[in-house]
Image (cartoon, grey):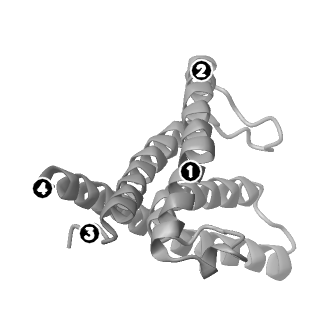
Amino acid sequence: MKILRGYLKGVDLFNEWAAKSFAWLVVILVIGMVYSTIMRYGFGSAPLWTFDFTYYLYAAFFMMGAAYTLRLKAHVRVDVFYRMLSPRWRGIVDIFLSLICFFPLFFAVLYFSMDNVSHSWRVGERAVESVIRVPMYPLKTIIPIVCVMMLLQGTAEFIRDLFLVITRRELQWK
């Protein structure tokens, strides 16, 4: 039990730290967008790099918060019937959907993204739709990292659900 609680605590705290660290990108994103808007409407010329800048920062911000959002159970869910279920039955539904949807999806994305990221680094891939041709490999590298984070958090949630279904009690590390 101590090992399970340690795993849950480690994964939860790491994903919370990552999400909260990357959340600061919003401040930089807002500053960049305000600068771009002032330049466009105040001086008639928006810098070319602002689209790429906002694209990169928002993508990193969005992806790095995904695992923490999973922990908070804040992802979009159609819960017309789910919310009427008891906690135990919610756990059963979550276990079932994790096994048939969540884990296969993230293992597949992890597997297929690795070749893409490796190739992107080898060729020094740059964005073709970008005026300044920013490098794409740093952004693509975030994809497998996020998959690992999601798989770790998904495993933690699976353990919690399994514990709830078996014992009818929630398993928390706190």
Front-lying residue, 82 or 28:
82
Question: Which of pointers 4 and 2 indicates the residue nearer the eye?
Answer: 4
Question: Which of pointers 3 and 1 indicates the residue nearer the eye?
Answer: 1
- The Cα atoms of the two marked residues, 4 and 2, are separated by 37 Å
- The Cα atoms of the two marked residues, 3 and 2, are separated by 37 Å
- The Cα atoms of the two marked residues, 4 and 1, are separated by 26 Å
Please give the label number shown on residue 2: 4
Question: Which of pointers 3 and 2 indicates the residue nearer the eye?
Answer: 3
| Residue that appears at 75% across and 80% down | 38
Residue at mark 2? 115
- The Cα atoms of the two marked residues, 4 and 3, are separated by 11 Å
Residue at mark 3? 172
Front-lying residue, 128 or 119:
119
Q: Earlier in the sequence, mark 4 or mark 1?
A: 4
Image x and y of residue 123, in percent = 63, 18
Q: Is residue 112 above or below residue 90?
A: above
- The Cα atoms of the two marked residues, 3 and 1, are separated by 21 Å
Q: Amino acid at mark 2?
A: Asp
Please give the label number shown on residue 96: 1
Front-lying residue, 33 or 89:
89
Image x and y of residue 97, in percent = 60, 52
Left or right of residue 86, residue 166 in this image: left
Q: Amino acid at mark 4?
A: Lys
| Residue that appears at 34% across and 59% down | 166
